[in-house]
Image: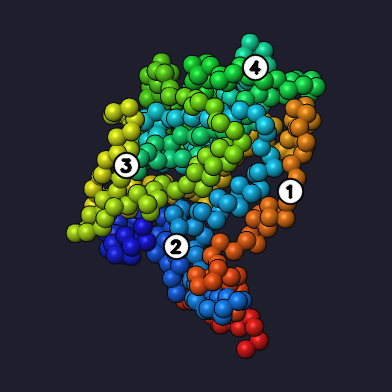
């Protein structure tokens, strides 16, 4: 990814001047500079064999494919104690393409509405005595891309298979292998989202440009949305996970995933980028293809998925809402009659980032930092020796 931006980013910025946001330019610069001398770095030395190596700093941008592994591990270490010994379900809510066009021009407002409508649909149907009759917890993760990098906003929701009774005295299990009716979820999600979008428009919180400029008028928006009130929206639930360990593995793939991983890139030549993608419409959803795009088109598609500054792409609802998550999870464990998890020293080290993921390549010993230095994009610009030498 960095090679693509380094080779073709400068020319693409010039060709698209005025159409690239500040946030997108920042992402481009971060990816281009990641793990290079531009960001500075440090000198490491093995405590056992004195092997020395130079390591450059990472950009830590959440859109950079090279910076997500450690962020995912840190986040999962913090979430490990919150897992419950019950089946977990994966429910996905997807916006129709006509709504996706509006979302692309109003990312913060529409993505936020997507989160709230999906979470409200889940918690409302789960609380209905005709279905589950319980308060549930939801962890929701926003993805805005499809396999070919087109704009395809949807949320992945990870939900325990059950919840707390309204009086707070017992845990209510869902039916084996079944969580909530997808058709009911879909129709409530559709109504909640369309009503919310209309409210955003009435409050003047939506902007429209280009082919959508006419939607600034309320009656035009109503006409645009009318067919969507009659179609079935895509909501689907996957099979329950095998157990808590599988939930953690799955969360690692979804919570800190970016639009495309470096492992999917096949080649960069003659100004063209080739990458693998999975065509879910063919051969039982397992057809792997290679798509070839111009470098400019590839960068345009990738940058479609840059999120607004400060926008949270992982959110928690119901029992897992941040204001009372610890207390509610403790209550769930009491009702399930399972002990609180024991946090080991290794778990604390992992959560604190104390485990060195890069041991000495010569002897496997521990590498310690003996010197740090800055680059032109880091501050302040001076080197620091940490061993007194």
The residue at which mark 1 appears reads as 343
Give the answer, above or below, for where 61 lies relative to 246: below
Residue 383, label in figure: none
At x 55%, y 20%, the residue is 177
Q: CA distance from mark 2 to mark 1?
A: 35 Å
Q: CA distance from mark 1 to mark 4?
A: 32 Å
Q: Looking at the image, is mark 2 or mark 1 nearer the viewer? A: 1
The residue at which mark 4 appears reads as 132
x then y, percent, for residue 234: 43, 24
Residue 30, label in figure: 2
x then y, percent, for residue 204: 50, 36
x then y, percent, for residue 270: 19, 59
Q: Looking at the image, is mark 3 or mark 1 nearer the viewer? A: 1
At x 37%, y 38%, the residue is 146
Choose the circle earlier in sequence order: 4 or 2: 2
At x 70%, y 42%, the residue is 81
Quarter of the picture containing the C terminus is bottom right
350 sits left or right of 187 in the view: right
Q: Residues at badges 4 and 3 in contact (C-beta under 8 Å)?
A: no
The residue at which mark 3 appears reads as 277
Choose the circle earlier in sequence order: 4 or 3: 4
Q: Looking at the image, is mark 1 or mark 4 nearer the viewer? A: 1
């Amino acid at each position: 990814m960095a090679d693509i931006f380094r080779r073709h980013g400068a020319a693409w910025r010039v060709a698209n001047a005025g159409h690239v946001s500040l946030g997108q330019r920042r992402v481009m610069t971060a990816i281009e500079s990641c793990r290079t001398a531009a960001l500075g770095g440090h000198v490491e030395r093995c405590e056992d064999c004195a092997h020395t190596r130079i390591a450059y700093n990472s950009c830590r941008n959440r859109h950079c494919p090279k910076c997500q592994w450690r962020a995912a591990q840190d986040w999962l270490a913090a979430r490990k104690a919150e897992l419950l010994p019950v089946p977990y379900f994966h429910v996905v809510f997807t916006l129709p393409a006509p709504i996706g066009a509006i979302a692309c021009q109003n990312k913060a407002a529409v993505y936020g509405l997507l989160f709230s409508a999906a979470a409200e649909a889940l918690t409302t149907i789960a609380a209905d005595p005709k279905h589950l009759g319980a308060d549930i917890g939801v962890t929701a993760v926003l993805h805005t891309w499809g396999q070919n990098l087109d704009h395809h906003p949807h949320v992945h929701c990870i939900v325990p298979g059950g919840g707390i009774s309204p009086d707070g005295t017992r845990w209510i299990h869902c039916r084996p292998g079944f969580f909530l009716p997808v058709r009911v979820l879909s129709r409530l999600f559709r109504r909640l989202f369309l009503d919310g979008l209309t409210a955003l428009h009435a409050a003047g919180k939506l902007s429209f440009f280009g082919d959508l400029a006419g939607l600034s008028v309320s009656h035009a928006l109503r006409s645009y949305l009318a067919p969507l009130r009659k179609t079935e929206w895509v909501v689907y639930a996957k099979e329950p996970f095998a157990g808590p360990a599988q939930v953690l593995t799955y969360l690692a793939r979804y919570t800190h995933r970016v639009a495309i991983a470096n492992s999917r890139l096949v080649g960069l030549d003659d100004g063209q980028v080739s990458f693998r993608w999975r065509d879910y419409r063919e051969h039982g959803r397992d057809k792997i293809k290679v798509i070839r795009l111009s470098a400019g088109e590839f960068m345009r598609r990738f940058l479609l998925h840059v999120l607004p500054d400060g926008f949270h792409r992982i959110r928690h609802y119901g029992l897992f809402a941040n204001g009372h998550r610890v207390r509610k999870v403790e209550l769930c464990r009491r009702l399930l009659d399972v002990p609180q998890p024991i946090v080991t020293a290794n778990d604390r080290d992992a959560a604190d980032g104390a485990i060195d993921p890069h041991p000495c390549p010569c002897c496997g010993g521990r590498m310690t930092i003996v010197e740090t230095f800055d680059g032109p994009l880091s501050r302040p610009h001076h080197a620091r020796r940490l061993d007194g030498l």
